[in-house]
Amino acid sequence: MSINIDQVTYTFIAESRELLEQMESALLAVARDGMDAVNAIFRAAHTIKGSAGMFGLDPVVEFTHVAESVLDKVRDGAIPVGDELVALLLGCRDHIGALVDAVESGTLDTDADLAQAGAPLVAALQGYLGGGAGHAAAAPAAVAGADAGAAAGMGHWHISLRFGADVLRNGMDPLSFIRYLGQMGTITGVVTLADDLPEADAFDPESCYLGFEIGFDSDADKAAIDGVFDFVRDDCVIRILPPENRVAGYLAWLDEAPATRERLGEMLVRCGSVTAHELDQALAAQAAARATGVPAAPIGAILVEQGAVRAPVVEAALAKQKQAPDTPRPQQESRSVRVDADKLDRLINLVGELIIAGAGANLVARRTQIPELLECTSTLSSLVEEVRDSALQLRMVKIGATFNRFQRVVHDVARELGKDIRLDVSGEDAELDKTVVEKIGDPLTHLVRNAMDHGIEPADVRTARGKPAQGTVALNAYHDSGSIVIEVSDDGGGLKRERILAKAVERGLVEPGRTLSDKEIFNLIFEPGFSTAEQVTNLSGRGVGMDVVKRNIVALRGSVDIASTEGVGTTVTVRLPLTLAIINGFQVGIGKSVFVIPMDMVEECIEFHEQPGCDWVDLRGQPLPFVRLRERFGIDGGAARRRSVVVVRYGGRKAGLVVDQLLGEFQTVIKPLGKVFAGARFLSGSSILGNGEVALILDMAALLAGVETESQAAVA
Amino acid sequence: MNIGDTSQGAAARLAVEGEMTIYRAAELKPALLDAVRAHDAPELDLANVTEFDCAGLQLLLMARREAARLGRRLALVAPSPAVLEACLLLGVDLDGETA
C-alpha cells in the first residue's frame, strides 16, 4: 500500500515542480505576455492547490490559496501587475517550492521555520486582498445571474465523468476526486453509472468500470473545476457543462447519444442539473420540429431561434463537446517514463564495465586467432557500441531548462542592481549529459551575474554611448566536435585591456614590458585573486569568482575562453565535453605507456620527420606546432624508429602530438583520476584497457594551451 | 438443491472486515461471488468495513448483479459509516437496484 501512495506523491512532487517552473517563466513574462501569462500563473497555482488538497497537504493548500486569491483578482483586473507584485509572487513561488521540498522529505508538518517563512508573504498578499474585495465578489455573481434557475452567486454546473479502466490501478480513487470537488462548492446530486460492469466472471476487481454524473453548485470557474481532475485527465473522459448554456449543452449531448437519451435525461434531473420541466420543454420543441418535417434541426439551433440562448454560447458549447469526448487524448503520458537518475547511472556504469570486459574478450580472440571467436567478438563489439550510445542518449537532456532558470536570475539580479537587463536565450535544443548539466549551473550563474554586474553599464552611460537603455545578456549553446559550447555574452562596456594589464603587473602576474595578445590579457581575469571592479558590489568583485569558474569548468574536462571589444561587449565561451562517462578514444603508445585522445578531436595522423631545432611540422604548406608527448611526460628511453604525429583540433586550435605508436580506436570508459593525481597537468582521467592495464586520457585543453603559449613565446 | 441449508442464516452471511478497497479487491471478488452463488439468500455483513473506495463499491454492485442474475437478492446488512458515507456521496442506494 505504501508503495503506491509514495508513487503518487512522487508524481505530485514532480508535477508541482514542473508547474512551479511554468509559473516562474510566466511571472517573468508578465510584462510581455500580459493576460496570457497571468492566466498561466493562476492555473499553475490553482492546480498545485488542487492536487495538494487531494493529498491532504494542508500547509500547501492554505498558502497557495492566498496566492491564488490574489491572482484571481489580478485576472479580474482588480489588481494591476507591477514589479512589486511580480517580485512578491516570485517569492511565493519559491515558498511553495520549499513546501513541496518539505513534502518530499516528509517534514511538511514538523518544519516550524518553513511555516514562519511563509508568514510575511501571506501578510504581503493579504495587503493586496484588503481592497477591492467587493468588486471581485460581484463578478461571478453577474455571470451566474444569466442563469435563471441558479442560486444567487452560484452557478449550477453539470459534470460527467467516465473513468478509464486503469484509474484504480494507478492509485487514484474516483471517490476522492468527488470528495475534493465537494470542497469547492455543493454537490447537489450524484448518479453512479455501473452500466459498464461486466459479467461476474469477466469482472476484473482492479479495473474501474464506473462513471458519474454530478450536479454541482459553485462559483468557481470552468478552469478551476476542470483542474480538480488534472490527475486523472488521461484516464478519464470529463465533460463539464457550464451554467450559462446548461440546457443547450445537455441537449446537444443528448443528441450525440440518442440510444441512451431517455436515461441521460432522467439522470440529469436526478442530479438536479435540469428541472424536469426544462427538459420536457426542450425535448418537446425538438420533437415538434421533427414532426413538421423540418430535417431534424439540432436542438441548439432551436433554442437560439427561440431566443433562449445566445448563438455564440451554443457554438462554444458544441465546439467544446466535440473536442472533449470524441478525441481521446493521445496517450502522451504512456510514451514517456520517469526514471530514477540513479538507475540510469547504474546502467551507464554497467555499460562501462561491459565495454571493458568486451575489450578483454576482443584481446583474447585476437591472440587465439579462432575465426569464429573473432567474428563473434566483432559482432559483440558493434552491439556494445550501440548499447553504449543509446544508454548515454538516455541521460542527454536539453540545455533549455537550465537556460530558462536564468530568466529568474537575471530578473532578480537586475532588480538588485537597479539596471534594466534582458536575457536572450538561443540554442536551447542542444543536448548534453545530465551530469554535466548539473555541474554547469553554478559556473554559468557566476558568469551571468558577472556580465550583469561588471559588463552592462548603468542606463545613463549606455544612453550616452548611444546604446539602448536596456542591456542584453545572451546565452547560446551549440555542438562542436564532440563538445558543447556555451556562450555567455553581454552588450556592455567590454573588458578594459589596459586596466587588466596594469592590474596584472601590479599583482605580479605578468612581468612589466612583456607583450601579450588581447586574448592572453583577457584570460588573466581567470587568474586567482584578480578583480578589476572599481566598486565592490554585493554580487561580485571580491576577487573570488572567475578563477573558481575556470577551475570548475576545467574539472569537467572543459575550457573557458573570453573575447571582448571595449565599448561593445564581452563573450565568454565555455566548452564542455558532451559526456563524462564513455567516449570513443584514440589510443597511442609512447614506450610502454598508453594514452587516449578523445576521438572527436583527432583530425588525422601523419608521419613524423625530425628536423632539428624545429618546433613545428609542415602540414600541406601550413606550419603545425607540436608537442613531443615523450618529453612532456618525461618517459625514459630513446625515441622509436618510426614516429607519427596525431593532428588534433580543440576549440579552433590545431596542434600535433608526437607519439611512438598508433594503436587505433577503442571505446574508452572514463574513470576519474585518484586524489593523488589531482595536481597532474595534461591528464583528464584514466581508463582500463582490455588487458587490465591503465591508459591515461589526455587533457587536450591543457596540452594545447601549453603549445600556444610556447610557440608564441618563441616568436616573441 | 438442499433447501435445508438456506434456513441456516449464519452460513449464508459473509462478513467483510477491514478495508474494502482496491488493495483487497482481487482477494474479495472470489469470496463475494462464492457467497452469492452458494446460497439462495446471501447476506453481506458490512459492519466492520473500515475503508471503502470505488473498487469496493464496484464489488458490491457486481455481487448484487450476479445475485439478480441467479434470481436472488443480496442483502447488505449493517453498513459501516465508511460504506454509508461513500454510498451517500455517490448516490448509490444500498437497498435497491442501482440507477
Image: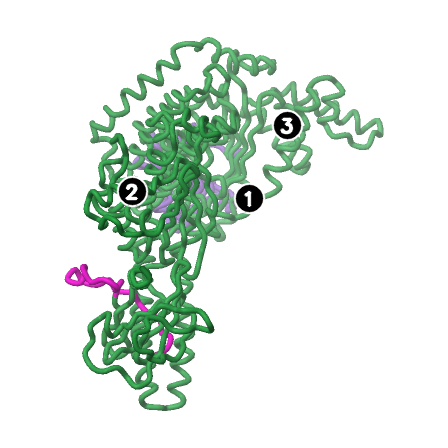
Image location of residue A648, percent across then percent down: 38, 67
Label 2's element? helix
Left or right: A98 in relation to A239: left
Evaluate whether label 2 is on the same chain as label 3.
yes
* Chain ID at mark 2: A
- What whole-number distance in Å separates the C-alpha atoms at marks 1 and 3? 21 Å
From the image, tell me which residue sits under label 1.
A329
Label 3's element? helix
From the image, tell me which residue sits under label 2.
A500
Please identify the residue farthest to the left as the structure is shown: A676
Q: Quadrant of residue A422?
A: top left
Image location of residue A503, percent across then percent down: 24, 41
Q: Nearer the viewer, residue A609 or A158?
A: A609
Q: Colour of chain B?
A: purple
Applied colour scheme: by chain
Image location of residue A541, percent across then percent down: 26, 36
* Chain ID at mark 1: A
Q: Relative to A125, does residue A194 appear above or below in the rendering?
A: below
**Chain drawn green, letter?**
A
Q: Would residue A103 be visible to someone looking at this image?
A: yes
Q: Nearer the viewer, residue A481 or A297?
A: A481
Q: Nearer the viewer, residue A579 or A364?
A: A579
